[in-house]
Image (cartoon, grey):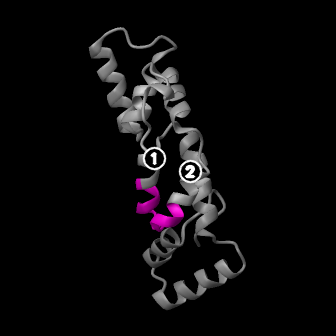
Amino acid sequence: MVQLTRREHSRVELREKLSGQGYQPAVVDEALDGLEAERLLDDRRFAESFVRSHAGRGQGPRRIRQDLMAAGIPGSLAAEAMDTGPDWAQLARETRRRKFGAEPPADWAERSRQARFLQYRGFSTDHIRIALGGSEADFELDPDP
């Protein structure tokens, strides 16, 4: 038996879990269709929950979008969910501050180290510049984070 109560799941994730336990594809699809009809399975709700959860962990929009796609969420649905996310530049600032403290980087080496950390977390170059001491007014933000 598969336990599903801990978090939302995407249809693709559930299909993989159930298929991995030996259930026939036709039975799996029928069960998933029933769950969707009862609104117990909803990829839109999953995507919005995923964005909130991962943004709360300090992950940036690029990484979250990539993880949504890996979970089988279509690009248009992922984009809608990303629009419900936080202010990404502010999240980059907060993530940098939590990891490195309130003071901006003192030298180039430290600035590079902090930038690499934020890049790994999935923030865009513009968000990283803002987090390292610039303001949003100083930069032309990429419309697609």
Residue 138 at x, y percent in the picture: 45, 25
Judge whether 44 appears above or below 48 on screen. Answer: below
In this picture, which residue range is highlighted in magenta? 66-78
Residue depicted at 46% across the width and 87% down the height: 25
Please identify the quarter of the rendering in which residue 94 is found: top right
The furthest residue to the bottom? 26
Residue depicted at 50% across the width and 66% down the height: 76
Residue 131 at x, y percent in the picture: 46, 25
Q: Is residue 3 in view?
A: no
| Magenta stretch: helix, strand or loop mostly | helix
Residue 18 at x, y percent in the picture: 50, 76
Real-space CA distance between mark 2 and mark 1, rounded to the nearest whole angstrom: 18 Å
Q: Which mark identifies residue 62? A: none
Query: Is 4 contained in the magenta span?
Result: no
Residue under label 2, please give it. 51
Residue depicted at 64% across the width and 62% down the height: 45
Please, what secondary structure does the residue beneath circle 1 have? loop
For mark 2, does the 10 Å Cα neighbourhood hold few (<14), some (14 to 19), or many (20 or more) residues?
many
Q: Is residue 66 in view?
A: yes
- In this picture, residue 14 sits left or right of residue 126: right
Query: Is 73 contained in the magenta span?
Result: yes
- Quadrant in the picture for the C terminus: top left
- Quadrant in the picture for the N terminus: bottom right
Q: Which mark identifies residue 143? A: 1
Q: Amino acid at mark 2?
A: Val
Q: Which residue is at the front of the view, 142 or 52?
A: 142
Number of marks: 2
Please, what secondary structure does the residue beneath circle 2 have? helix
Judge whether 49 appears above or below 119 on screen. Answer: below
Q: Do the numbered discs 2 and 1 sit on residues whose CB atoms are within 8 Å?
A: no
